[in-house]
Image: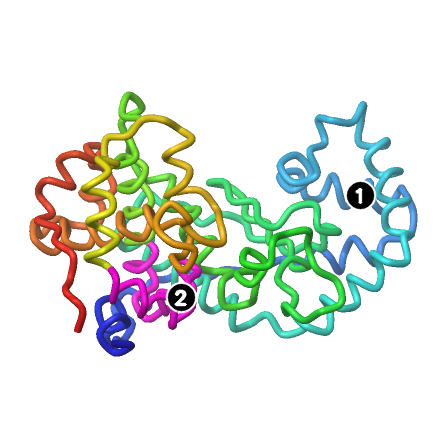
């Protein structure tokens, strides 16, 4: 069962040398070092002016009267002894960030291959004091490394355990790529059905798997391998629940949230069923659509018609193996 479940999207693979040969490099700027080495408001002010995108997007400078006020606030924050210990922990855990940097560069090359208009954003790391985990815009990416400390670390973000387990080093780049997928994921704003949500997330996960073909599904959707295997073994039962309860065209946001929103399990089906099952089903539908219709990745992402994608997918749940 494990081989079957993982085999659907995780066959042995090799990255495309032609794609990776592109002239594209990624430099990750370790801003936490610069900010924690600053001693006074003048030095913080210099850093704020040196990194205007970071200052505007991440530190939300527009909430302050001026940059001087923000720099003085940063002096107070960085004098906090607990934050200093948190920074030291991040330094110890992420002193070598080259593996993440390489994975991010490979992903950007794949995105650039499929979407030539993609412009590589500036990439920063930071220690936010658990104020912000990840910021992804078309111009800027900021990774709050304190969120990605090991799950058994003394300092932990204020997250439910089932969510905190996904904040680990192997999830960083898949999270970023999934966020970038939204720049290309066309939707119909008039379609507010559960099916539309399912297809949206299905396209997002399919995008991430296409960009990172050798990455385990575990790090894309956030299910453990055991949960993935069990979910595939119950795919017929899960699908019958959606069909028998006429859920695909449900528009009640409270009902939709039961199958799309973050939750430790989908209690409408079973307390043993993982949360976000609607997203998982949407991923299977989108996979089948692209395989059966032989469309390119950019054509898939540009298609806003969730109903068409579903109808033309020919989706049928896989029987237990």
Q: In the rendered image, which residue does mark 2 sit on? A: 218
The percent position of residue 261, horizontal first and vertical second, equals 44, 42
On screen, residue 289 versus residue 48, left or right, reads left
> Neighbour class for label 1 at 10 Å: few (<14), some, many (≥20)?
few
Quadrant, the N terminus = bottom left
Q: Earlier in the sequence, mark 1 or mark 2?
A: 1
**Residue at left 37%, top 35%?**
256
- Observer-nearest of 212 and 131: 131
| Magenta stretch, residue numbers | 208-234
**Residue at left 12%, top 48%?**
295
22 is higher (above) or lower (below) than 13: above
On screen, residue 98 versus residue 320, left or right, reads right
Whether residue 17 is visible to the viewer of this picture, yes or no, is no
Q: Which SS does the magenta portion mostly show? A: helix
The percent position of residue 296, horizontal first and vertical second, equals 16, 50
Which quadrant of the structure image shows residue 287? bottom left
120 is higher (above) or lower (below) than 256: below
- Observer-nearest of 180 and 102: 180
The secondary element bearing badge 1 is classed as helix
Q: In the rendered image, which residue does mark 1 sit on? A: 46
On screen, residue 307 versus residue 229, left or right, reads left
Mark 1 or 2: in front is: 2
**Residue at left 80%, top 32%?**
67
On screen, residue 203 versus residue 39, left or right, reads left
**Residue at left 24%, top 38%?**
245
Which quadrant of the structure image shows residue 270? bottom left
């Amino acid at each position: 069962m494990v081989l079957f479940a993982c085999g659907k999207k995780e066959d042995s693979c090799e990255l495309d040398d032609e794609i990776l040969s592109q002239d594209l490099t990624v430099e990750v700027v370790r801003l936490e070092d610069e900010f924690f080495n600053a001693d006074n408001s003048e030095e913080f002010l210099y850093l704020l002016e040196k990194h205007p995108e970071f200052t505007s997007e991440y530190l939300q400078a527009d909430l302050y009267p001026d940059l001087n006020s923000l720099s003085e606030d940063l002096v107070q924050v960085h004098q906090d002894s607990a934050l200093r210990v948190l920074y030291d922990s991040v330094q110890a855990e992420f002193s070598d960030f080259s593996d993440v940097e390489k994975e991010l560069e490979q992903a950007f090359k794949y995105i650039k291959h499929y979407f030539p208009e993609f412009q590589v954003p500036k990439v920063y790391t930071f220690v936010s004091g658990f104020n912000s985990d990840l910021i992804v815009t078309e111009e800027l990416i900021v990774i709050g490394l304190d969120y990605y400390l090991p799950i058994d670390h003394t300092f932990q973000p204020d997250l439910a355990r089932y969510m905190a387990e996904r904040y680990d080093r192997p999830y960083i780049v898949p999270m970023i790529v999934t966020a970038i997928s939204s720049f290309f994921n066309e939707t119909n704003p008039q379609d507010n059905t559960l099916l539309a949500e399912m297809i949206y997330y299905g396209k997002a996960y399919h995008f991430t798997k296409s960009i990172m073909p050798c990455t385990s599904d575990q790090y894309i959707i956030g299910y453990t391998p055991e949960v993935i295997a069990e979910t595939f073994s119950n795919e017929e039962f899960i699908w019958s629940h959606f069909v028998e309860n006429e859920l695909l065209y449900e528009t009640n946001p409270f009902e939709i949230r039961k199958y799309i929103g973050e939750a430790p399990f989908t209690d409408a089906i079973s307390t043993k069923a993982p949360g976000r099952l609607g997203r998982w089903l949407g991923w299977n539908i989108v996979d089948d659509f692209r395989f059966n219709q032989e469309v390119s990745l950019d054509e898939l992402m540009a298609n806003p018609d969730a109903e068409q994608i579903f109808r033309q997918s020919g989706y049928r749940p896989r029987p237990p193996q």
